[in-house]
């Protein structure tokens, strides 16, 4: 017994100095640093979502979803009498849904078509030009997209802030994401599938519509959901294109409100502070659900 | 855009780039973009400096140390969520939670300024830098790593001498692309930078950035001011496109 102890101590004496000064020590401390910084990174997610939930939940009630945003005066009255602010963000919710629906209507067909084109003609020169343009478009800051659409649509087509302009701006931001995800998910289809369809004498357009798109469908949906979740929270381009509207609006040539725009308005109005958190919580929840949904679909496809 | 900014270009010429006066007073209007360019660059560079250790660690965490484990997939999902959080929510969080925290630390009186906005930008760009460098780290071939291990190298030595030299260009490109993101961020910066039209003098000085001046003044602008704002937008577009092109070029060269 004693002898084994001595042996162990001897062994430890051999290893330990190395353990605290040498290569092993460096290795160990590097791993600890990595874990430490990674934990900091992911802690931000919890910090942000946690603070939103803590501050936002008590404003969420039925009226929050069915009534339009209150004006400053009502909010101030409610605040001084210690009640929660009446009204909700119905104009923002409908506006956001409307804008996103219009944007999807513009961006999805174009995006999927361009993605199919890039996949089918990946070696051609046009394809690489289009790919470069897509890259540039993806890198354009959102506020610059807003400026461009302001100059195109607001000034020349609708002559004033409008829903159409907002949805064009959002569509421009969706487009590169959808093109990319379409091309990537098409690339994952085995070539044999396409060749089998062609060997049966299927016309080219049917190969695309009946074979390529159905087989890559989950991939397409994932990309579209991700793109929608990305544009739902966009504020800067909307500030330059749709401006906001205190009432619910379904007219494409008139301004419309959106949840992020309302948050910006509440932020600039000291009486509305309580509403900020609930609308932010709502927006965050919506975006998170879309994000997780697309992840879940992607995971299901891969398994 | 070019035609929209022509009025301002004719008025100020190349001086627009180096003048730091921004004065919308009627009658003696004077516009220069230098202070906004400076504000944008300062915040973005600061953001990049803060983000690099975080993104580097997280990408090694996901791509090397805990590769293909449940832990790695949880962490990478969380990082993706971080990328999904809208800019305005970062801004609000920075305004109501980070800013008071910085004030309570005694770093600055109001909590606005270069440092605060750089910090929030850093959090925003970590996911972009992480996901790309993570995928290049995972692409380094196992044979090389195994050869190094068989020679008795520790994990750190493998990372330092095998993985990093092989993934270097991809990692650099990911930081450049993340930098491009930081340049164009609007609302989070607008809420935190202080919107003072001065060239920032230090880490805690206030300032203004290209994107936030557009967001703040666009509503009331007309004529020459509008044209100057559009010119700033054009500048921002050119700068980010160049940065992104450099990043993409590095990736292409690597592939």
Image (cartoon, coloured by chain):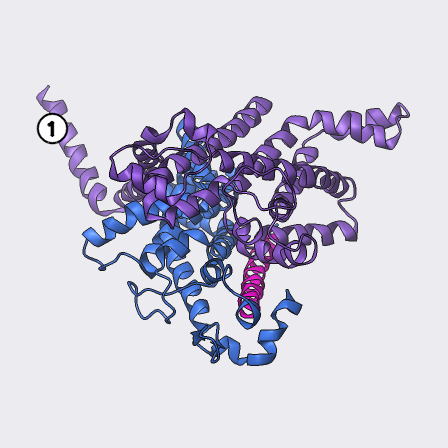
Chain colours: A purple, B blue
* Residue that badge 1 annotates: A6
Q: How many marks?
A: 1
Q: Nearer the viewer, residue A83 or B211?
A: A83
| As drawn, B179 above or below A23 | below
Task: Reply yes or no: does residue A130 show up in magenta.
Answer: no
Q: Quadrant of residue A113?
A: top right
- Tell me: A73 left or right of A103: left
x then y, percent, for residue A141: 54, 55
Residue beneath the point at 25% across and 58% down: B110
Per the image, label 1 sits on a secondary structure element best described as: helix
Dominant secondary structure, magenta: helix
Q: Residue at x 16, y 28 (%)?
A: A8
Indicate the position of residue A177 as horizontal and vertical percent values: 61, 42
The N terminus of chain B sits in image quarter:
bottom right
B232 drawn magenta? yes
Q: Is residue B118 left or right of residue A106?
A: left
Q: Which residues are magenta?
A: B227-254
């Amino acid at each position: 017994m004693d002898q084994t102890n001595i042996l162990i101590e001897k062994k430890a004496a051999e290893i330990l100095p190395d353990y605290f000064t040498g290569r092993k020590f460096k290795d160990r401390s590097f791993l600890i640093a990595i874990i430490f910084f990674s934990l900091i990174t992911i802690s931000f997610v919890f910090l942000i979502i946690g603070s939103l939930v803590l501050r936002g939940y008590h404003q969420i009630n039925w009226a929050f979803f069915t009534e339009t945003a209150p004006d400053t005066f009502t909010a101030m009255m409610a605040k001084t009498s210690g009640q929660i602010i009446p009204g909700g963000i119905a104009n923002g919710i409908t506006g956001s849904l409307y804008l996103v629906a219009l944007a999807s209507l513009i961006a999805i067909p174009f995006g999927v078509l361009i993605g199919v084109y890039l996949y089918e003609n990946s070696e051609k020169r046009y394809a690489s030009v289009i790919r470069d343009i897509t890259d540039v478009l993806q890198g354009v800051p959102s506020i610059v997209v807003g400026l461009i659409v302001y100059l195109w649509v607001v000034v020349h087509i609708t002559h004033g802030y409008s829903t159409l302009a907002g949805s064009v701006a959002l569509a421009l931001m969706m487009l590169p994401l959808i093109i990319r995800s379409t091309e990537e998910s098409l690339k994952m289809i085995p070539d044999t599938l396409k060749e089998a369809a062609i060997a049966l004498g299927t016309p080219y357009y049917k190969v695309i519509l009946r074979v390529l798109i159905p087989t890559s469908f989950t991939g397409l949906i994932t990309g579209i959901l991700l793109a929608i979740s990305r544009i739902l929270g966009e504020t800067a381009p909307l500030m330059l294109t749709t401006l906001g509207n205190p009432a619910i609006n379904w007219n494409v040539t008139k301004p419309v409100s959106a949840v992020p725009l309302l948050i910006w308005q509440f932020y600039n109005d000291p009486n509305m502070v309580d509403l900020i958190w609930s609308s932010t919580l709502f927006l965050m929840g919506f975006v998170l659900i879309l994000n997780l949904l697309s992840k879940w679909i992607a995971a299901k496809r891969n398994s | 855009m070019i035609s929209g900014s022509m009025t301002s270009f004719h008025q100020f010429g190349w001086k627009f780039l180096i003048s730091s006066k921004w004065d919308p007073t009627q009658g003696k209007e004077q516009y220069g973009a230098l202070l906004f360019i400076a504000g944008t660059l300062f915040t973005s560079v600061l953001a990049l400096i803060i983000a690099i250790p975080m993104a580097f660690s997280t990408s090694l965490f996901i791509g090397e140390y805990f590769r293909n484990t449940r832990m790695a997939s949880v962490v990478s999902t969380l990082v993706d969520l971080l990328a999904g959080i809208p800019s305005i929510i970062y801004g609000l969080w920075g305004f109501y939670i980070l800013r008071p925290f910085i004030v309570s630390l005694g770093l600055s009186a109001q909590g606005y300024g270069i440092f605060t906005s750089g910090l929030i930008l850093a959090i925003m760009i970590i996911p972009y830098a992480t996901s790309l460098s993570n995928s290049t780290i995972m692409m380094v071939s196992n044979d090389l790593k195994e050869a190094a291990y068989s020679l008795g190298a520790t994990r750190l030595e493998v990372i330092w001498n095998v993985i990093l030299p092989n993934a270097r260009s991809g990692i650099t490109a990911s930081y450049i692309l993340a930098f491009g993101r930081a340049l164009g961020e609007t609302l989070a910066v607008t809420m935190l930078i202080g919107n003072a039209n001065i060239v920032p003098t230090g880490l805690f000085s206030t300032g203004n950035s290209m994107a936030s001046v557009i967001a703040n003044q666009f509503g009331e602008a007309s004529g020459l001011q509008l044209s100057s704002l559009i010119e700033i937008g054009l500048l921002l577009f050119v700068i980010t496109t160049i940065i992104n092109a450099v990043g993409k070029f590095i990736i292409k060269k690597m592939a």
